[in-house]
Each structure stands twice: as C-alpha cells, then as structure tokens.
C-alpha cells in the first residue's frame, strides 16, 4: 500500500498542471501586442485593392479584346465585300477569254472552209471538158462497184464499165491508154462472174409459200411387194396350191393388203399439220434470207429440209404436192457464186485524175525552114576576101 501511494505521488509531480488548475490571475493579456493586428488589416486591405485592380484590369483587357475581335470581323467583312467585285470581274474576264478562244477557233475553221471553197472554185473555173468526162467516168465506175458488191448484179456493172470506157475513149488522149487498159481488165473480170437471178428465185419461194396451204397430208407409196407366182398348174396334185392361189386372187379383187418394211407414221392432227406448214414457211423464209446474203450452204440446207418435210408428211404423188416438191428440188441445185473481185484497178487512177485534172498534151512544134543569114564579122575580125572585093567594086 505504501508503495502504491509513493508511485501515485511521483506521477502527480511529473505531470504538468492542467489549465483548470492554474489560477485566473495569470491569464495572458490579449492587448499586449496591438501592432500585429493593424499590419494584418493593412495587408488584407492591400490584397483586396490589388485583387480589385487586377479584376478591373482584366475586365478592361477583355473589353479591348472583344472590341478588337469585332473590329477584325468588320474589317474581314469589308475586305470580302471589296473582293467580290474583282472576283466577279475576273470570272467575267475568263468567260470572255473562253468566248474569244471559241470565236477564234470558229474563225479559223471558217477561214479554212473559205480557202477550201476558193480552191474548189478555182479548180472548177479551170475545168475543161476532159475533166468533166473524167468525173463522169469515175462516177460510173463507182456505181458499177455498188451494183456488183451490194446488189450482186454483174450485168449492170459490166454495162456501166463499158459506158465509162466510152467516155474516156471520146477524150482521145494518148496519156489515158493505161486507164483504158485497167478498165478493160475490170470488164473482163466482171464478165467472168456468173450472175444468179436472186429476185426471180425469191419470187419463186414466195409462190411456193402461197401454195403450202393446198398440201394434203398423206403417206407416200413406198411399199415393198414381193413377186408372187399366181399361175395355176394343170397337175391334180397341186390342188391345194391352186385353191390358195384362186382364193388369193379373189381376195385381191376386193381387199388390198399392203406390206411395209419400216415403221408406220401416223397421220397428223389439224394442229400438228398447221405447225408443220408454218415450219416449212419458216425454212423457206430462211432460204430467201440466205439468197439475199449469197450464202449457198444455208440456202441449200433450208430448201432440202423443207423438201424432206413435204415428202415425209404430205402427199406428193400428184397435184400441188408434186409441183412443190419438183420446184424445191430444182431450187436445191441452185449455185450462188461469190464475187471474186474486191476492187477495180481503174478506181485509184480515176480518183487521181479527178483530183489533179487531165493535163492537156503539149503542142508539137512544126519545123519551118529558116533563111540562111551570114553572120556579121566581129569588129576585130577582118572581112573575108569576097566581101572586101564586093565593097571595093561598089565604091
């Protein structure tokens, strides 16, 4: 117990005294340092003044920046408004330059056309009757080419070439012998071409198509009848054979039995018959088109197919069927020769003559005797003796 009391007394001595235990008469005097409070107040006031000044300066700067911004915008608007007119003028100038360039190009084209017309007028004014004959011959040769290659009419082409040769022969120009030689070669080549009557064959196919409706369906007689011996023998032993022969002869008088080696094709219905006739017409139209194109292979194939259908499904023993079949067989043997000529030899020569014109032959000078004139002697040359003697006699 005593030890515990001693320890508690030692602890109470070591601890500082609490505020409540201090006496009230030793409290610090608050008014002991009055200078520090006024300095703090002055510093706060200065800080407030400086903050207000900074705010006022910032607001002033802000107002200046706003005014400067509005001023800049107004200046930009004025500049853009001022630049609109020069830009529009520049665009107008560019359009004007483009129009001027177009007018210049058109003027150049018109000038070129005018010069070409002047050259043509000059050439026409300098034309001679021979030039007109050459132009006519060139036109006739070109027409002959169209008749030969477009219409496949070598007869008309040959007559046109002959007419062109007559025009050139009427000129009586020795320089045109090569042209007449080329025309003669062209006429020989055209005369060797075999002409096919395309229009006549086309009209023949039209007539066949008109007569297709008259075809009657039927089968052709292509039966096979083996030979039979129908004679009756005189022997009594052959009574069975003779009886069969007599019965067969009696039956043949009333009933006809036909034997076929192939399949029997049934008759066509009206609808099938109509379709078949239309198919035949289509093949004949294809044959006409092949004629116009001068395609011999396609023409022959179409005609043979139409002929085969007529033989297979229609009666061709007599009447319309036989006539159509005969006409188709004759058309199937038609030959269409292609034109072996690709270009006339005289075309280029005539074109050159039309462009350059026919040069008139130079006149041949007629040799005329000229009187002999003695040449006068030179001043430094002495006269001949005969001349000197004659002059002395005259003196």
Image: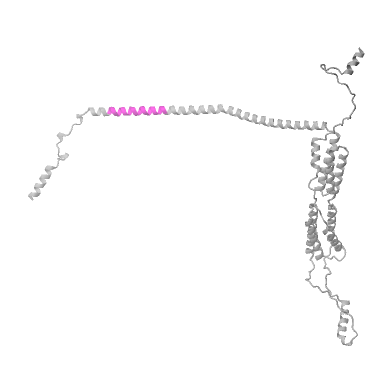
Q: Residue furthest top?
A: 395
Q: Classify residue 298 by image quadrant.
A: bottom right
240 with respect to 114 (left or right): right
Q: Relative to residue 237, is residue 80 depicted above or below? A: above
Q: Position of residue 169 (x, y in %)?
A: 88, 40
175 with respect to 36 (left or right): right
Q: Position of residue 326 (x, y in %)?
A: 85, 61
Between 187 and 215, the one lying in front of the other is 187
Q: Residue at x 15, y 35 (%)?
A: 24
Q: Position of residue 281 (x, y in %)?
A: 80, 58
Q: Residue furthest left?
A: 2
Q: Residue furthest right?
A: 393
Between 151 and 32, the one lying in front of the other is 151
Between 208 and 373, the one lying in front of the other is 373
Which region is colored magenta?
41-61
Indicate yes or no whether the magenta region holds residue 59: yes
76 with respect to 101 (left or right): left
Q: Residue at x 62, y 30 (%)?
A: 94
Decide whether the magenta segment is chiefly helix, strand or loop. helix
Q: Relative to residue 332, is residue 370 depicted above or below? A: above
The reply to whether residue 6 is visible in this rendering is yes
Indicate yes or no whether the magenta region holds residue 193: no
Q: Relative to residue 1, is residue 171 depicted above or below? A: above
Q: Quadrant of the C terminus?
A: top right
């Amino acid at each position: 117990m005593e030890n515990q009391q001693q320890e508690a007394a030692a602890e109470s001595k070591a601890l500082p005294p609490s505020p409540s235990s201090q006496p009230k008469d030793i409290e610090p005097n608050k008014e002991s340092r009055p200078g520090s409070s006024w300095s703090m107040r002055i510093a706060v006031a200065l800080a407030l003044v400086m903050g207000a000044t900074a705010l006022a300066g910032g607001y002033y700067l802000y107002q200046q920046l706003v005014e400067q911004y509005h001023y800049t915008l107004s200046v930009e608007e004025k500049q853009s408004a001022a630049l609109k007119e020069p830009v529009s003028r520049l665009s107008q100038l560019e359009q004007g330059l483009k129009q001027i360039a177009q007018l210049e190009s058109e003027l150049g084209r018109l000038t070129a056309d005018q010069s070409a017309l002047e050259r043509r007028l000059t050439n026409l004014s300098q034309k001679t009757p021979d030039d007109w004959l050459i132009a006519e011959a060139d036109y006739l040769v070109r027409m002959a080419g169209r008749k030969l290659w477009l219409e496949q009419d070598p007869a008309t082409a040959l007559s046109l070439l002959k007419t062109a040769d007559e025009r050139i022969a009427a000129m009586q120009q020795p320089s045109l012998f090569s042209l007449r030689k080329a025309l003669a070669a062209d006429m020989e080549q055209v005369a060797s071409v075999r002409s096919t009557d395309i229009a006549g064959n086309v009209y023949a196919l039209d007539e066949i198509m008109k007569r297709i409706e008259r075809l009657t369906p039927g089968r052709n007689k292509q039966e096979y009848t083996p030979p039979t011996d129908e004679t009756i023998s005189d022997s009594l032993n052959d009574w069975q054979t003779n009886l069969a022969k007599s019965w067969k002869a009696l039956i043949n008088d009333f009933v006809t039995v036909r034997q076929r080696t192939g399949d029997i094709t049934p008759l066509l219905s009206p609808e099938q018959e109509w379709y078949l006739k239309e198919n035949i017409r289509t093949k004949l139209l294809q044959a006409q088109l092949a004629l116009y194109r001068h395609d011999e292979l396609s023409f022959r194939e179409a005609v043979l197919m139409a002929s085969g259908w007529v033989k297979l499904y229609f009666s061709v023993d007599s009447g319309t069927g036989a006539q159509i079949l005969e006409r188709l067989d004759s058309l199937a043997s038609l030959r269409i020769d292609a034109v072996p000529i690709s270009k006339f030899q005289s075309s280029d020569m005539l074109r050159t003559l039309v462009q350059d014109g026919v040069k008139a032959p130079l006149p041949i000078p007629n040799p005329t005797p000229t009187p002999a004139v003695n040449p006068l002697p030179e001043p430094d040359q002495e006269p001949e003796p005969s001349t000197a003697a004659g002059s002395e006699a005259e003196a």
